[in-house]
Amino acid sequence: MSRTSTNSAPEDKLADRPPSPQSPARRLIAALLRDRLALIGIVVVSAFVLAAALAPAIAPQNPYDLSQLDILDARLAPGSRSGGGSIYLLGTDGQGRDLLSAILFGLRTSILVGVSSAAIALVIGTSVGLVSAYAGGWVDSFLMRVVDIQLSFPAILIALIFLAILGQGIDKIILALIVTQWAYYARTTRGSALVERKRAYVDAARSMALPDRAILFRHILPNCLPPLIVVATMRVAYAIMLEATLSFLGIGLPVTEPSLGLLISNGFEFLLSGEYWISVFPGLALLLLIVAINLIGDALRDILNPRREG
Amino acid sequence: MAAPILSVSGLDVSFRAGDAWRNVVRDVAFEVGPRETLAIVGESGSGKSVTAMSIMRLLSPANARVTGRIDFEGRNLLDLPLAEMPSIRGNSIGMIFQEPMTSLNPVLRIGKQITEVLEQHRGMTRSQARAEAVRLLEKVRIPSARSRLNEYPMNFSGGMRQRVVIAIALACSPKLLIADEPTTALDVTIQAQILELIKTLQEDEGMSVVFITHDMGVVAEISDRTLVMYRGDVVETATTPDLFATPEHPYTRALLSAVPQLGAMAGTEYPLRFPEVDMTSGEIAETGPTARTVDDASAPILDVDKLVTRFALKKGLLRRTVGRIHAVEGVSLTLRRGETLSLVGESGCGKSTTGRSIIRLTDPVSGAVRIDGKDVLGAGKAEIAAIRRKAQMVFQDPFDSLNPRIRIGSAIAEPMVTHGIAHPLQARKRAGELLERVGLSAAMLDRFPHEFSGGQRQRVCIARALALEPKLIIADEAVSALDVSVKAQIINLMLDLQEQYGLGYLFISHDMAVVERISHRVAVMYLGEIVEIGSRRAVFEDPQHEYTKRLMAAVPIADPSRRRARQPSNDEIKSPWRPADYVPPQRHYREAGHGHWVLDN
């Protein structure tokens, strides 16, 4: 048997590669940082998230505390000085709220609603998609018909009906957004899981008698993530937009805790009378956030495109 | 030699890699004379296809830099404006690619795809072009050519599509035909037909041919002169008989010694390792004989009895069964410890499905399978897990059979931990040992699959299969996707492991020459049935069944002095599709010798 130990792989010497034990996640982040537009997106989103997180500390005023509001300061132009002597950088709204503070606090709500609803919808949708693809047969048919029905109604309509039944509140709006969105994740996951399921490494795992659970979550799921990450990024933006729409229509959040959509809605009536800032500044913030998230999403889609790999 | 048709000199090709340029072809020079066939042979990454693409100027100038001279019909093709290339491509130089499935447009009728070329390049009217298309299809021996003009590529089999591609390449009577691995994706009997066709057409049309291939057997069959490429360099050019008789360069020698030759094993009893070649000195070290590994005394490790696997084809709203693929039909075989039984046959013969049915990756319809005495088909979930530990599978595509997101250390350790054989730490240590055992190093445990070459990945797959200490390994085309030299190494490794652990191999392959090298016994499959089974010597030295003989005759022989005149046949591989009410006939086998059974027709 002395011979066999010398049977090392000669092709290794030929194909000498520098060892680069990088995980796929690290390679993804590195590629993302190399993309200039994505970098801008990341910087903008990070700034918004940071500002929202620190809002109570950095906002000049707590816009939800009615005792701090002064109705005499209502509808002041940007840069005006308040009765108390402080400057309203972005002006005030109809109730005399400092718009900058209102936007910072509104961002908190928008981001919380967008991210949490997208995350929960992701978990639910992904599980449904995986089960559907792996089980096949009538389970698959049933789940996918439910998805079809869900997707055939406009998201806004479903959310409207839901909120009409449940009433206002941040938890209810998150619930409504989850209901309107899980189906997208389920469809995406099922598609890629079906492809992955046919690959030889899944057969290999089955032939090693690994439990179904391990095959699904340890082997198939990580390989389905690339398209899901892209969908999730875009969906966060969409959820924030949908929440703004619902609030604009006045059925999302209570007036006392305005999100960006509600702020825009509140300023809408003054828009034609020249007091543009009440609607425009929250609108700009919303626009910037959505565009930035989409920039990241676009870059992710390019980086994670399987045709580009290799 | 008469003035060459094509003359290439000082050809250098670099590809853009990020900001740098990576040199992939260096100083390639060769000439192709009139009516000459030049083979460019090499393994993957040798630059042979890149060379062909640069002749046709098919490389994108943004990503590839080509310098040197390519003289064709008195002009340097590299100096021509790109806009003039289309008149050369197709008109004076025809090209055939490897993949007949993708080089035809799936949504256009075959006739349209041929007449389009004729109308554009030869200025024919529609009716002239149609008549000419029929003539071309007849020339590449497509039966009832006129009626097939209106069919789509999906109605054609792989071999027939390649004929259509050749017909299109010939449409303008080119002076030079460049064929890039035209038979690699085809079955061996179909390959033989296509090679024969190219040879005949070359003589009829007086073309020159540049034939690019990795297969030394094909080289020996078809070429007058041969160019050997290795990692971007031409290492040797010689007339084909000289190259095979007296290879000069160490690499050529290594390549030739790694090529299994059908019939070379005549008279030997046991499998044989490939000789090991030192790539720098070219010295060939014969490897020792393999020991007797087959354990006749104990009960068979695998016992398959009248296995049947069919796939129903359903149609319509009510999912009515309209027919069935009879993938495996009444297959019976046994395999002992330390024995290698090969299942050979062409695509669609059911050899892979047999392997998958045995460990129930696919569920068979009927029959019985016992692995180490345990019934597999009646087993429940827990029992299947226990049985699968004894029988592991190694798959064809080493790029597909490892999860790209799992480090190989975890991939090898996972089954051991799941089956409670070892704690995670022990499993990791054991994974390191297994890697060393298959010729890699324990330091590679934390690498991802993409950091390995194809051969190394296949070693990892073998290490993973060994993790559960199986008694039986089902190797489904395990070496088919590998380069010849790597293939030889993996076969040697498998033989070593068999000696050491007494493994039984069910070796599923379409490659007769490799099968001859590795097997103790051989079963030939055709349309889901075993047509002949027996000892390797009996089947190879005294084939009984008509199909076995045909299969053996089709294998290209890597020896130009043994080039045979072939009977150009037009047979296609038949489909195992049957209508829903089909009842398979009762089959009888006659015993042609001790343990050598042949299907009676």
Image (cartoon, rainbow, N blue to C red):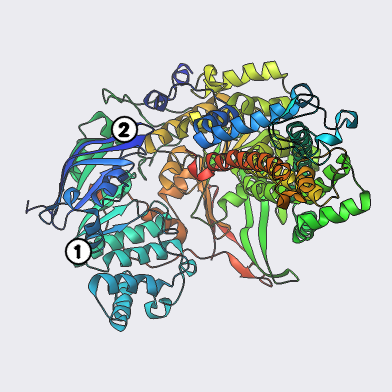
Q: Which residue is mark 2?
A: B21
Which of the pair B223/B407 is nearer the observer?
B407
Above or below for B191 versus A206: below
Q: Chain of mark 1?
A: B
Kindly indicate the quadrant of the structure image that contains residue A275. top right
Q: Which residue is mark 1?
A: B203
Residue at 86% in and 28% down: A68
Q: CA distance from mark 2 to mark 1?
A: 42 Å
Q: Nearer the viewer, residue A104 or B204?
A: A104
Indicate whether B499 appears above or below A249: above
Q: Are marks 2 and 1 in contact (CB under 8 Å)?
A: no
Judged from the image, the secondary structure of the residue bearing numbered disc 2 is strand
Residue B419 visible, this orientation: no
Residue found 28% across the figure and 77% down from its top: B132
Identified by mark 1, the residue type is: Glu
Q: Is residue B391 left or right of residue B201?
A: right
Q: Residue at x 60, y 23 (%)?
A: B409
Judging depth in this view, the residue of B279 and B443 nearest the camera is: B443
Q: In which quadrant of the rendered view does residue B48 lie?
A: top left
**Chain designation of label 2:** B
Considering every residue shown, the one lying at the far left of the view is B2
Percent x, y for residue B334?
62, 44
Please determine whether, in this image, residue B226 is positioned above or below residue B95. above
Q: At which x and y percent is residue B121?
A: 25, 69
Q: Residue furthest bottom?
A: B127
